[in-house]
């Protein structure tokens, strides 16, 4: 028969996030909501338990709570704890409004090009778990101290650290107590105003160009929850493929004080799509048309996680617009053009040709992989079906690594419209 304390550890190594029957008062700490206050993507890297040695506590029994032996942890226990603390953390950060992105094998390769700004990592500085047998109260008492670090990917530095602790007592001998203790330590971290201040201070503000302050815009600024209707194309020409010249006329080069990129017009009154990283941190932003005419721009809506932005270009008269195809994703092998402003603003409206080489998933977004040449500055420009002239995606990133060439990615137009709350309808 196994010693009692080894049986306890079989239950402590549960894979899913445990929820026990608490026997001690739990402090209620309301997390500070950052919804609308922090726009940049945050990655939660989970909890590192490598510093925690074994044993972590003891098992006690009898009316006098006599020590029976040590409570030890195994590699399997540590792996299980890492898994469910990650689950608990992801849910808590998301609920508090953090634009959380989960890690995946594909994402680990693309993160340098997809707008990730912050990473939060936690390390268990100490863990204590004591179990008590039936005669000693039949419960588990646990405590944990966690060191938290907020990493700024742009400055490549830790910009905030904190240490929080939690303790709990639950019925029976299981991993429920340590899970509750971690929840308390996490709640203390999320209720820390200093954390929010550090995030806001380092976050990327999305500013409206100063030149546009006194412009008589043709659209009312939408509220954050508004669905925005737009007319996708004049039905008189719906049956005809859009020419490359017509599509190019609807592409604009976006220039600002901190960089440049591309965008394309959806509507005649100036609604346009681009990437979040193109408008991020811009204090001035100007649209330049193919003719060389320049117009002011304002930012209407952004999604930093998806790397998307909806902007409005001041069009005193009707702007040229792109055409959008039917719902769905282009099949691999579809020939496409990429139109944008690669490398330099003097190269605006450059056209390259390739194919859709694969469809990839990144969270809720479908990425169209393409071998059409894309470079810095192409971001935000359209990926266009050669046969129909319809825009099928928004160029967003390129995978750059030794020995790899021809791996560009575009966000599918359907997912971009859905993410930004845009509803297209046919003109009557």
Image (tube, rainbow, N blue to C red):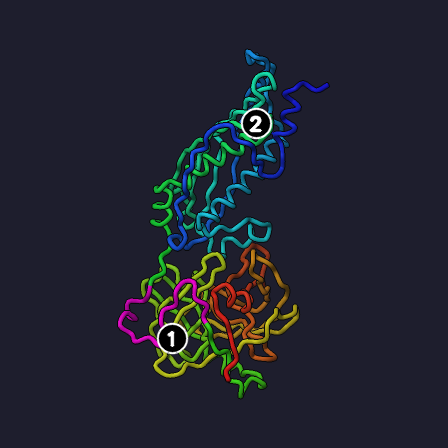
Q: Which residue is mark 1?
A: 288
Callout 1 crowding tier (Cα within 10 Å): few <14, some 14–19, many ≥20 = many
> Who is closer to the viewer here, 3 or 208?
3
The relative height of residue 265 versus residue 110 in the rendered view (above or below) is: below
What is the x, y in percent for residue 70?
59, 18
Q: Which residues are magenta?
A: 208-228
Are the residues tagged 1 and 2 within 8 Å (C-beta)? no
From the top left corner, tell me how far across and down residue 182 is, in percent.
Answer: 50, 34
Rendered image quadrant of residue 191: top left
Instruction: Look at 37% across and 83% down and name the residue there.
Output: 317
The residue where tag 2 is placed is: 171
Residue 215 belongs to the span the image colors magenta? yes
Q: Nearer the viewer, residue 401 or 43?
A: 43
Residues under labels 1 and 2: Cα distance?
Answer: 67 Å
Secondary structure type for disc 2: strand
Q: Is residue 134 left or right of residue 260?
A: right
Chain-order first, disc 1 or disc 2: 2
Category of crowding for the residue at label 2, using alpha-carbon neighbours closer than 10 angstroms: few (below 14), some (14–19), many (at least 20): some
**Measured along the vertical axis of the image, is residue 71 above or below residue 46?**
above
Q: In the rendered picture of this protein, how many numbered marks are placed on residues?
A: 2
Is 396 left, or right, of 296 in this rendering?
right
């Amino acid at each position: 028969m196994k010693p009692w304390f080894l049986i306890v550890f079989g239950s402590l190594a549960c894979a899913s996030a445990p929820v026990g029957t608490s026997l001690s008062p739990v402090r209620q700490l309301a997390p500070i909501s950052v919804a609308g206050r922090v726009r940049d993507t945050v990655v939660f890297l989970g909890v590192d338990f490598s510093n925690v040695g074994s044993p972590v506590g003891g098992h006690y029994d009898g009316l006098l709570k006599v020590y029976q032996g040590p409570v030890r942890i195994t590699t399997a226990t540590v792996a299980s704890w890492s898994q469910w603390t990650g689950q608990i953390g992801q849910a808590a950060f998301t609920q508090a409004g953090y634009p959380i992105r989960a890690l995946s094998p594909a994402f680990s390769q693309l993160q340098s090009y997809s707008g990730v700004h912050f990473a939060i990592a936690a390390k268990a500085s100490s863990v204590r778990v004591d179990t008590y047998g039936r005669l000693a109260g039949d419960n588990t008492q646990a405590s944990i101290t966690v060191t938290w670090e907020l990493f700024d990917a742009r400055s490549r530095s830790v910009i905030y650290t904190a240490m929080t602790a939690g303790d709990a007592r639950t019925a029976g001998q299981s991993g429920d107590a340590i899970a509750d203790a971690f929840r308390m330590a996490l709640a203390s971290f999320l209720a820390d105003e200093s954390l929010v201040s550090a995030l806001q201070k380092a976050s990327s503000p999305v500013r409206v160009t100063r030149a546009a302050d006194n412009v008589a815009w043709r659209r009312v600024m939408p509220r954050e929850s508004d669905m925005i209707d737009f007319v996708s194309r004049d039905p008189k020409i719906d049956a005809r493929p859009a020419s490359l010249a017509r599509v190019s006329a609807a592409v604009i080069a976006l220039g600002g004080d901190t960089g440049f990129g591309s965008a394309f017009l959806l509507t005649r009154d100036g609604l346009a799509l681009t990437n979040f990283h193109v408008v991020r941190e811009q204090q001035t932003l100007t649209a330049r048309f193919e003719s060389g005419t320049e117009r002011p721009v304002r930012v209407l809506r952004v999604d930093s996680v998806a790397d998307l932005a909806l902007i409005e270009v001041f069009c005193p008269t009707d702007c040229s617009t792109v055409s959008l195809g039917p719902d769905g994703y282009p099949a691999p092998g579809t020939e496409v053009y990429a139109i944008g402003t690669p490398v330099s603003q003097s190269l605006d409206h450059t056209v390259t040709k390739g194919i859709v080489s694969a469809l990839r998933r990144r969270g809720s977004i479908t990425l169209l992989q393409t071998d059409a040449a894309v470079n810095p500055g192409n971001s935000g420009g359209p990926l266009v079906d050669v046969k129909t002239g319809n825009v099928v995606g928004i160029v967003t990133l390129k995978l750059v690594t030794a020995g790899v060439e021809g791996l560009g990615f575009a966000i599918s137009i359907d997912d971009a419209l859905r993410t930004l709350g845009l509803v297209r309808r046919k003109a009557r």
